[in-house]
Image (cartoon, rainbow, N blue to C red):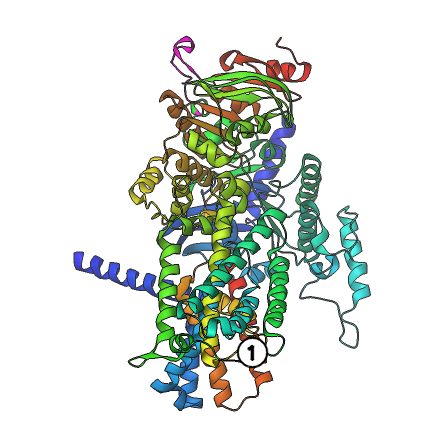
């Protein structure tokens, strides 16, 4: 008791004497007519890891870029060590002591690690030549100080994502930066790499640096950060001390609604009054050891559950693309499927939202409108006038609340949630009889998640069943009516999602029998 | 108050207009380049701004402009057609061959188009079936075609071409060269196809993401076939016009159009997998390259230097395009 009082007392006095390292006051930033930040304030203290939390599109990245000197604020003040600053560009902010590790790295792939570390500030010999030896030696020292076993002479392009990130951090350390900004640093990292990153961040913290940490992964934020500032729709919502805050409170601040409303209520249609839309009967196929037996009824959302890579994708693709089977039958709407490619699956009335949206779903350089209207093209003769469907596309954009500047904006500019909605819109524009949704909310922020779940449920209620795969078991349990459990490319059985727990499903997926 | 708001709206739309103009200028380097060339020639070579000179440039730009339009179709689909030079070479010696020179005029028009289309079909088939690199396949095809042109001409081409071929290349309707109307017709056709027809949408989708197009139920193989057939046929048409200019058979005609067509496409704002220049940008790109060559020749710059300057401009345009996409 005494101890904690004294500690909080010293902390208080510290905060009174020490001005924040960085203070953003009432920052506004607009791009054209779009306001990305509306009066956001934030104060970062030395020795603090300060999380900035918000959905995609909440303005986190814009705020970070403003602090890093990439964007100049439209209005508002930025104070660095007590003085108002207006950085010309990112380099100026960098010089002053703000080091930023962005989602996309800016290491030059054809230069070595050492050359990247010293870029623009290479040590010189007396002749004015670049002192390579000093550069390499100093780089090695700096990397070792951070506990990194990286060869400074390696080309940056040969490094993995995690290593590139480490080099970016080393760059900041070598410049003796005061502030480190991390923009979703763990998005591309594995667990162990993330742990190493956290250790590094804690070390920076111990050395009295100020750290801004953007993420929407709550566990990370609780593990790492002492303060959380929440943004929503470009506005400041609240600042919490992580101690004492609950994830529910943070999510509620972030989304503006409660977490339990994430999943819509399950189907009210009695199972025995529904007809089978899809039926796999004793199916064996390449990648599916089989036998695979399950059905999808007309008003259901059915989830394929199991460990990753146990036949989920093979099942969805065999159905959609009409794979040649080694054994068994796939029935769709009563009859065995006849198609043998994606175009045939679409013609039969199946829509598919692929798990890897960017690789297999989106035409990133084309407009949102084109991406949506692309769903109308299959089956049309090439010599026909392309359907404009302007009204239909606009209707879908409005209905799914896809946030964009202009329908012809390249879809690559949109956030993950909006891209996913556009892919769904592609199939809503067409009359489909079944939707396959692989990973419905991968890389989608929590607000858009709720909207996507509601949409899938609405489809099922209208008699368009949905077949879902997901790596996130809670999502399958929350969203679906029924789970089909897979193990080694065969079905174990199915269970009502209402009775499923993560434990039950995992047991079935690992031991191969329903408990 | 309302008046103030209205004028504000007007200014912002003006600003928006200027911004989109600036964006177009950056993404279609041919426009500022053409404007720059015209301004520069006002100082360096005022003669180059006279109508007769401009009409000559227009006429000369037709073969390149045609080939570039065809080339752009393959490039939008993320492929490439290096066999256009071979098509032109073979078309040229065939047109100068007795069979076509003295045959019915329609034969001299149908043969090049059919030959080009067939070459394009074979290209597409090899690319799709063998999953081989379009660069290698079409380059190989070009070598085969040039070889065939040597066989047809016996290594010593010459002879006369059909009068109809000369007419379409060198004739005039009023002031304007007939060839320019052919060019405009092809440009209009391709432009409308890209903007309005299903196949145009499919080609752009294919170029943007092959895997998405295939999984999205689009006929990717057929689309690639159409792009290559069109490119080949249009190269055949360019062969007719080019042959009509010189009126005789020669060795390896059209060779320099291969790289120049890539240059015109890039200048026109189209790159591998798409872009935003459209056919009009490519027409401007072809005009830039042709006008520049004429201007330099008029100023007495030697041919090798012309190539150097041309190359630099193209590299600059490509750099600009890369910068833009970043």
Taking the image as shown, residue A117 lies to the left or right of residue A363, namely: right
Query: Residue A485 sits in which quadrant?
Result: top right
Which stretch did the figure color magenta?
A262-276
Relative to A503, does residue A238 appear above or below in the rendering?
below
Label 1 resides on the chain identified as: B
Instruction: Say which quadrant the C terminus of chain A sits in.
Output: top right
Q: Position of residue A251 (x, y in %)?
A: 48, 30
Query: Which quadrant is the N terminus of chain A positioned in?
Result: top right
- In this rendering, the answer to whether A138 lies above or below B161 is above
Rendered residue at 33%/79% (across/down): B172
Q: Is residue A110 magenta?
A: no
**Observer-nearest residue: B187 or A89?**
B187
**Could you tell whether A255 is left or right of A490 in the image?**
left
Q: Residue A4 at x, y = what percent?
A: 62, 29
The one nearer the camera, B208 or A65, is B208
- Disc 1 target residue: B250
At 41% from the left and 56% from the top, the residue drawn is A74
* Crowd rating for badge 1 (residues with CA inside 10 Å; few <14, some 14–19, many 20+): many
* Residue B10 visible here: yes
Please check the rendered image and state whether residue A263 is part of the magenta-colored stretch, yes or no: yes
- Give whichever of B266, A244 is nearer the camera: B266
Give the vertical position of A221 relative to A136 (above or below).
above
Place of residue A218 in the rendered image (x, y in percent of width and height, measured from the top left): 56, 32
Percent position of residue A41, x then y: 45, 46
């Amino acid at each position: 008791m005494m101890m904690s009082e004294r500690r909080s007392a010293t902390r208080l006095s510290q905060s009174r004497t020490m001005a924040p390292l960085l203070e953003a006051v009432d920052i506004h930033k607009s791009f054209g007519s779009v306001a990305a930040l509306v009066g956001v304030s934030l104060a970062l203290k030395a020795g603090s890891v300060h999380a900035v939390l918000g959905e995609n599109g909440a303005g986190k990245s814009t705020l970070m870029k403003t602090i890093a000197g990439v964007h100049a604020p439209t209005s508002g003040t930025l104070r660095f060590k007590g003085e108002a600053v207006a950085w010309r560009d990112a380099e100026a902010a960098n010089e002053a002591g703000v080091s930023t590790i962005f989602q996309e790295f800016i290491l030059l792939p054809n230069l070595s690690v050492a050359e990247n570390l010293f870029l623009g500030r290479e040590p010189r010999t007396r002749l004015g030549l670049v002192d390579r030896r000093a550069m390499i030696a100093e780089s090695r020292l700096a990397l070792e100080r951070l506990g990194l076993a990286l060869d400074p002479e390696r080309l940056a392009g040969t490094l993995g994502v995690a290593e590139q990130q480490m080099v970016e951090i080393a760059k900041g350390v070598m410049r003796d930066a005061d502030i480190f900004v991390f923009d979703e640093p763990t998005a591309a990292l594995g667990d162990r790499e993330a742990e190493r990153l956290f250790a590094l961040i804690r070390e920076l913290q111990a050395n009295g640096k100020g750290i801004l940490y953007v993420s929407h992964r709550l566990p990370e934020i609780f593990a790492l950060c002492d303060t959380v500032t929440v943004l929503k729709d470009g506005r400041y919502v609240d600042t919490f001390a992580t101690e004492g805050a609950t994830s529910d409170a943070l999510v509620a601040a972030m989304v503006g609604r409660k977490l339990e409303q994430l999943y819509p209520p399950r189907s009210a249609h009695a199972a025995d009054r529904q007809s089978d839309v899809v039926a796999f009967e004793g199916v064996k196929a390449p990648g599916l050891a089989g036998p695979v037996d399950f059905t999808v009824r007309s008003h259901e959302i059915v989830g394929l559950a199991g460990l990753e890579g146990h036949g989920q994708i093979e099942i969805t693709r065999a159905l959609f693309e009409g794979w040649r089977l080694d054994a068994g039958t796939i029935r769709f709407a009563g009859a065995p499927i006849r198609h043998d490619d994606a175009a045939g699956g679409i013609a039969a009335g199946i829509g598919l939202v692929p798990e890897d949206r960017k690789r297999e779903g989106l035409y990133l350089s084309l407009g949102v409108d084109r991406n949506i209207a692309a769903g109308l093209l299959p089956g049309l003769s090439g010599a026909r006038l392309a359907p404009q469907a302007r009204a239909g596309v606009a209707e879908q954009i409005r209905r799914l609340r896809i946030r964009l500047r202009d329908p012809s904006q390249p879809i690559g500019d949109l956030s993950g949630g909006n891209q996913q909605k556009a892919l769904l819109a592609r199939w809503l524009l067409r009359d489909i009889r079944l939707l396959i949704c692989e990973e419905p909310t991968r890389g989608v922020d929590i607000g858009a998640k709720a909207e996507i779940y509601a949409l899938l449920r609405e489809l099922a209620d209208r008699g368009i069943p949905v077949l879902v795969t997901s790596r996130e078991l809670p999502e399958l349990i929350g969203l679906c009516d029924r789970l089909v459990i897979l193990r080694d490319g065969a079905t174990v059985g199915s269970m009502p999602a209402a009775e499923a727990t993560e434990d039950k499903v995992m047991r079935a997926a690992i031991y191969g029998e329903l408990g | 108050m309302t008046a103030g708001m209205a004028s504000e709206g007007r200014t912002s739309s003006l600003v928006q207009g200027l911004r989109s103009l600036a964006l177009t200028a950056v993404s279609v380097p041919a426009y500022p380049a053409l404007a720059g060339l015209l301004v520069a020639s006002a100082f360096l070579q005022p003669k180059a701004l006279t109508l007769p000179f401009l009409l000559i440039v227009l006429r000369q730009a037709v073969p390149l402009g045609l080939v570039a339009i065809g080339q752009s179709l393959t490039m939008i689909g993320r492929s490439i057609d290096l066999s256009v030079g071979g098509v032109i070479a073979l078309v040229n010696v065939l047109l100068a061959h007795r069979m076509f020179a003295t045959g019915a005029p329609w034969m001299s028009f149908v043969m090049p188009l059919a030959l080009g289309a067939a070459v394009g079909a074979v290209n597409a088939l090899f690319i799709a079936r063998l999953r081989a690199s379009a660069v290698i396949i079409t380059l190989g095809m070009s070598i085969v075609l040039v070889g065939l042109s040597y066989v047809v001409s016996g290594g010593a081409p010459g002879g006369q071409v059909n009068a109809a071929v000369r007419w379409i290349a060198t004739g005039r309707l009023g002031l304007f060269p007939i060839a320019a109307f052919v060019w405009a017709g092809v440009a209009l056709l391709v432009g409308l196809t890209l903007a309005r027809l299903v196949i145009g949408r499919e080609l752009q989708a294919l170029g943007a993401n092959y895997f998405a197009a295939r999984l999205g139920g689009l006929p990717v193989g057929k689309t690639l076939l159409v792009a290559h057939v069109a490119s080949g046929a249009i190269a055949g048409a360019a062969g007719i016009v080019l042959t009509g200019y010189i009126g005789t058979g020669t060795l390896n005609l059209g060779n320099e159009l291969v790289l120049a067509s890539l240059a015109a496409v890039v200048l026109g704002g189209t790159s591998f997998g798409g872009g935003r220049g459209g056919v009009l940008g490519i027409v401007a790109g072809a005009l830039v390259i042709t006008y520049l060559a004429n201007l330099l020749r008029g100023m007495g710059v030697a041919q090798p230097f012309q190539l150097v300057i041309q190359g630099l401009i193209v590299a600059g345009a490509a750099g600009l395009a890369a910068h833009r996409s970043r």
